[in-house]
Amino acid sequence: MSVLIITERNDIHGHALIWALESMGVRCDRWSLTDFPEQQRNSIRISNSLAEPVCKVAGLAPSISYTSIWLRRLVAPKAISGRLAAADVEMAQVQAQRFAEGMRTVISPGSIWINPVGTRTWSTSKPYQLRAAKEVGFVIPTSLFSNDPDEIRAFYREHRGNVIYKPFTPAFWKDRTAGGLRGVFTSRLTEDLLAGDDASFTSCPGIYQECIEKKSELRVTFFGSVYQAARIYSQQVASGRLDFRSDMKGEAPMEAAALNASLLEKCQAFAAKLGLLHGSLDLIERPDGSVVFLEINEMGQFLWLEQRVAKMPMLALFAAFSLEPSADFNLDARRPNISFHDYLKSEAYPAFQKDWSANHPEQAMPFNYTE
């Protein structure tokens, strides 16, 4: 048995899974596009005389058959030679991107993908997520996806100013004045913002939603039919009240949570509708105990849950799941006797920290841990 992870070199989830599987005696390879194409020599050979395409990827055994392929982080190829003329760089990047996309369709035929490549377009669409969640019985926040200033202002008035803004994807940039990184999380829409230049709205489409009153939040991660839920008391920390991710210090109390039968059924129906074997849902628990669906991240971070709540066996679960990936995967006595805390105490973790610091001198490690 063997597993392939497609991810960035400095992804702690990929690094921890490699350590976990190798501890179990299972081969685990990583394919990163961060240094492609300049520092990788890859090829696909197809002919009438070959039963299957022959793929050669730098660092991987030729045409190895993997049990599963974890499509963890799908970064665009960026390593373009500095010897190219500046006008040619964009074309080279496009060709490298298309080549990588093509290779993913033929590498290791018969492998089970986590998640199937074809599900990504739908599962990452925020409008489609809300529509699907509503269809399986979830309550959803009234939402507006727009770059029309008039629509946004009207939505704000309809909800009497009780409106939040969210970006479609996490947004971070370097602060050239103060140093370090800045990020955009969920924030309140205000009269002052609405009175600003229309270009701020037209140039940058966003997600606008009614602000839902919270008692707590649920982070629900599933591996096949195994569901693990954490309750986050985000309202007890000022920085996390609108978005628990902005609680960068992790000060909000957390605990493992049990899903009642009705909520579990909705989660399972939603995962099936999107065709996902694995993912992380974000839900709101209102003061009256009812639950509101926010979104799903099909490749959401999950090791931070085990770091905060040790009884949640996230790394062991995913290691076992990667060897038997299916919608019916269930937990049994064969769960490996490893944990994320074991990884953090191993020699592998300091090596990861050193590599991260060398490649991300401006970021504390790991910056986007709770995505």
Image: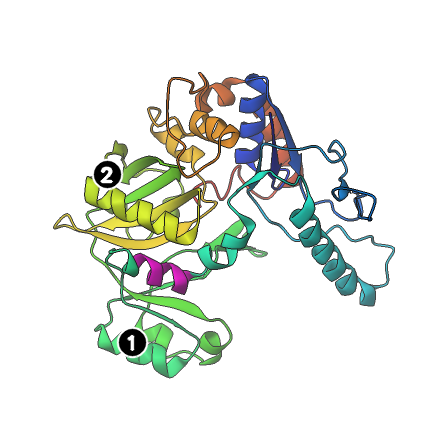
- Which residue is rendered at x = 37% and y = 26% of the image? 331
Residue 9 in the image: x percent, y percent? 64, 38
Q: Nearer the viewer, residue 20 or 188?
A: 20
Element at badge 1?
Answer: helix
* Residue 187 visible from this viewpoint: no
Q: Amino acid at mark 1?
A: Phe
Residue type of the residue flagged with mark 2: Leu
Vertical side of 148 occupied by 222: above or below: above
For the residues bearing labels 2 and 1, Cβ distance under 8 angstroms: no
Specify the quadrant that holds the N terminus.
top right
Question: Where residue 149 appears, x then y in whole percent?
Answer: 40, 80
Q: Is residue 330 above or below residue 139?
A: above
Q: Identify which residue, 186 or 108, lies in the foreground.
A: 108
Per the rendering, the mark at residue 155 is: 1
Q: Nearer the viewer, residue 120 or 352?
A: 120
Q: Is residue 270 visible?
A: yes
Q: Magenta stretch?
A: 126-133
Rendered image: mark on residue 259: 2
**Is 113 on the left-hand or right-hand side of 271?**
right
Prevailing SS of the magenta stretch: helix
Work out how far the residue at label 2 is from the one at label 1, CA to CA, in angstroms: 33 Å
Q: Residue at x 31, y 66 (%)?
A: 209
Q: How many numbered circles are shown?
A: 2
